[in-house]
């Protein structure tokens, strides 16, 4: 069932989209924690050791959280993080939102999607009739902040994949929404640009998958909020709501 005009208008207002007036793309700074910063390592990064699915496939929530908190598989990440960012929300959620990696504020607070990007994500959830922690779980491809907020390396994402997959097994969501290019490409094992991945239902491990923009990107490029709106409408249709 599609959204009513009232629901659509609520979304547009929540997302800060003017209904009839096109918005120019401003030269705005990135959200806090979203701008890559040059990072110079004092020594060569330690090698990355992948986690075997068999190592975590039988862990319960508490055991998995403890394993992640103690993880040192990615030497560079373990050496520079403040703490791991496990994920947050309803552990029996229908909706699973997956981002790329923690930023500086997430690293400090230990929770994904805080700050301005988190506020925008909360607005997106509100427009769907959802709320953080109620029917929603939020996680990232990586559990550690990459130094300088650089993009996750492929080997780091692979090393962390077993943790995310175990979370998915425990949650058993009805739909996954990938937030941003890095999350989408890592889940799908592709280098296709985000523009070619969004706009159609895909799947990850036999779970419907919808691709949309990362909230931090939308803060920098507000004109693309309309496309994000289309993606959320697609997710609602996939869910049959």
Image (spheres, helix red, strand yellow):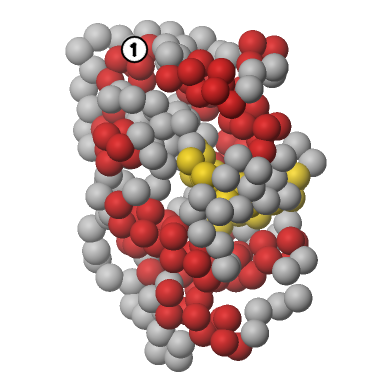
Picture quadrant of residue 183: top right
Picture quadrant of residue 72: top left
Q: Residue at x 50, y 67 (%)?
A: 126
Q: Position of residue 79 (x, y in %)?
A: 30, 15
Label 1, residues with CA under 10 Å away: few <14, some 14-19, many ≥20: few
Picture quadrant of residue 36: top left
Q: Residue at x 50, y 23 (%)?
A: 65
Q: Quadrant of the N terminus?
A: bottom right
Q: Which SS class for mark 1?
A: loop
Residue 20, above or below 27: below
Give the left or right position of residue 210, taking residue 89 as reference.
Answer: right
The residue positioned farthest toward the bottom in the image shown:
20
Q: Quadrant of the C terminus?
A: bottom right
Query: Between residues 224 and 98, which one lies in front from this camera angle?
Result: 98
Visible residue check, residue 150: no
Q: Position of residue 19 (x, y in %)?
A: 46, 87
Residue 26, above or below 153: below
Q: Position of residue 189 (x, y in %)?
A: 64, 35
Residue 224, above or below 107: below
Give the left or right position of residue 83, taking residue 158 as reference.
Answer: left
- Report the label total: 1
Residue 52, above or below 182: above
Q: Position of residue 34 (x, y in %)?
A: 31, 46
Q: Residue at x 69, y 45 (%)?
A: 173
Report which residue position mark 1 lands on: 45
Q: Residue at x 64, y 70 (%)?
A: 233
Visible residue check, residue 211: yes
Give the left or right position of residue 143, taking residue 204 as reference.
Answer: left
């Amino acid at each position: 069932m599609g959204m009513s005009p009232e629901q659509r208008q609520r979304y547009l207002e929540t997302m800060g989209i003017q209904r009839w007036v096109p918005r120019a793309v401003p030269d705005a700074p990135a959200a806090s924690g979203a701008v890559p910063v040059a990072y110079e390592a004092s020594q060569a990064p330690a090698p990355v050791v992948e986690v075997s699915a068999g190592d975590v496939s039988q862990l319960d929530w508490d055991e998995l959280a403890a394993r992640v908190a103690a993880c040192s598989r990615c030497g560079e990440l373990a050496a520079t993080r403040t703490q791991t960012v496990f994920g947050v929300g309803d552990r029996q959620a229908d909706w699973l939102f997956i981002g790329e990696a923690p930023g500086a504020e997430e690293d400090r607070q230990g929770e994904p999607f805080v700050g301005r990007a988190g506020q925008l994500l909360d607005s997106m959830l509100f427009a769907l009739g959802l709320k953080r922690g109620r029917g929603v779980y939020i996680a990232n491809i990586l559990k550690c902040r990459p130094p300088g907020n650089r993009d996750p390396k492929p080997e780091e994402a692979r090393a962390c994949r077993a943790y995310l997959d175990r979370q998915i097994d425990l949650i058993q969501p009805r739909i996954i929404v990938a937030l941003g290019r890095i999350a989408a490409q890592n889940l799908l094992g592709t280098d296709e640009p985000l523009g070619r991945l969004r706009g159609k239902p895909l799947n990850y491990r036999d779970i419907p998958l919808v691709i949309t923009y990362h909230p931090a990107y939308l803060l920098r490029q507000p004109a693309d909020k309309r496309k994000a709106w289309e993606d959320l409408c697609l997710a609602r249709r996939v869910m049959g709501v």
